[in-house]
Image (cartoon, grey):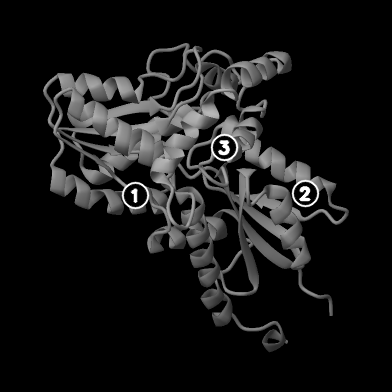
Amino acid sequence: MLHPEKTGLLLLNLGTPESPAPSDVRPYLRQFLSDPRVLDIPGWKRWLILNLFILPFRPKESGEAYEKVWTDEGSPLLVYGRQLTNKVQERLGEEIVVDLAMRYGEPSIPGTLRRMREQGVDRIVVFPLYPQYSSAATGSSLEEVFREAGKLWNTPWIQVVPPFYHEDVYLDVQARVARPHLEEIDPEVVFFSFHGLPERHMRKSDETGRHCLETPGCCEKIVEANRNCYSAQCYHTAGKLADKLGIPMEKRVICFQSRLGRDPWIKPYTDELIVEHAKAGKKRAVILSPAFVADCLETLEELAMRGREDWEEHGGELFRLVPSVNAEDDWADAVVELAVRTTGFLKPAAESADEPSAAANH
């Protein structure tokens, strides 16, 4: 009888430096911003910007920001990633290898793929932990997985869990986490803040060239032309999540954060709207960031710290960040459900135990 092929589940996230020290932040930023899917400009121009304007200054600034959110266990993104990996492993059982990799930094994609091969994994389900699709995150991560897997003599069989921006199993967990904060604060405004991208990324995702940023309200509905548009998927996520939470339309604000450089990014900008609503007399605000499944620098420092400072400085009083789903038990359940339902490769241990053995069928 042939030995059954072993299956693995590879959880993917973006990455983190090994420490807040500029000496560790610098190589992380170099790897991240050298990616042509992130800085999608001519190579010579990317090199100049990176080496003349970013790397001489930003590692120290970013390191100071990381220092504010760093924990005794390390980077929050990595800590939550490991916790989630362990919980998913418990649910799937020992027959399936569950591992975590980062697109940039450690644990690296090449190292994790080698480790899975050493454990006899032939079939891999890749789960990019990005709810909405973007070429800069999802596309880059998948490109790296396929590139590195292709270097192996025995290439693994790979299937990918698609973006889950619209999936109830994800949004229900986020809503469950958010509900107590909304009830406690009773906000006058609820910000749905998503990581920003240059506007040109939206245009490039529209293969028709006639819809994204070309028509009024182009992100209000998912259609054929914008099915891969990050911004349209963000609007869909925000609308569906707000409906689940019963947030009135007049309190909903969709915005985009973390812009870099002078090129136009997706509007409106989170930092500007926080100030604008505080100046307008709003006192209580809640902010969610459902583009992130794990809290990280962009949520903990940029929103919870700097966002609150801007809110209070301009007249606001209460400002609360809703945590990401992180390693919540029901999020681990959702990861398993999405991986099983969208690929058919995986079966939780309890499910497998209930099935009759092959021998029993003969």
Expressed as whole percent of the image width and height from the top left, the position of residue 178 reads: 27, 48
What residue appears at the point 39 percent right and 13 percent down from the top-left corner?
Answer: 216
Q: Which residue is mark 3?
A: 25
**Disc 3 and disc 1: Cα gap in Å?**
30 Å
Q: Quadrant of residue 56?
A: top right
Question: For the residue labelled by badge 3, is the local secondary structure a helix, a strand or a loop?
Answer: helix
Name the amino acid type tagged 2. Ala
**Mark 3 and mark 2 residues within 8 Å of each other at the beta carbon:** no
Question: For the residue labelled by badge 2, is the local secondary structure a helix, a strand or a loop?
Answer: helix
Of 223 and 85, which appears nearest the observer?
85
What residue appears at the point 63 percent right and 16 percent down from the top-left corner?
Answer: 52
**Disc 1 and disc 2: Cα gap in Å?**
33 Å
Q: Quadrant of the N terminus?
A: bottom right
**Disc 3 and disc 2: Cα gap in Å?**
27 Å
Circle 1 Cα neighbour tier, 10 Å, few/some/many (<14 / 14–19 / ≥20): many
Name the amino acid type tagged 3. Val
Asked if residue 193 can be seen in this view, the reply is yes
| Badge 3 or badge 1: first in the primary sequence | 3
What residue appears at the point 44 percent right and 63 percent down from the top-left corner?
Answer: 333
Q: Which residue is mark 2?
A: 149
Q: Residue 174: which numbered mark, if any?
A: 1
Q: Is residue 130 positioned above or below 31 on the image? A: below
Q: Is residue 73 positioned above or below 67 on the image? A: below
Question: For the residue labelled by badge 1, is the local secondary structure a helix, a strand or a loop?
Answer: helix
Q: Residue 229: which numbered mark, if any?
A: none
Expressed as whole percent of the image width and height from the top left, the position of residue 214 reads: 47, 11
Asked if residue 249 can be seen in this view, the reply is no
Circle 2 Cα neighbour tier, 10 Å, few/some/many (<14 / 14–19 / ≥20): many
Q: Is residue 260 left or right of residue 283?
A: right
Of 253 and 41, which appears nearest the observer?
41
What residue appears at the point 67 percent right and 27 percent down from the top-left corner?
Answer: 34
| Badge 3 or badge 2: first in the primary sequence | 3
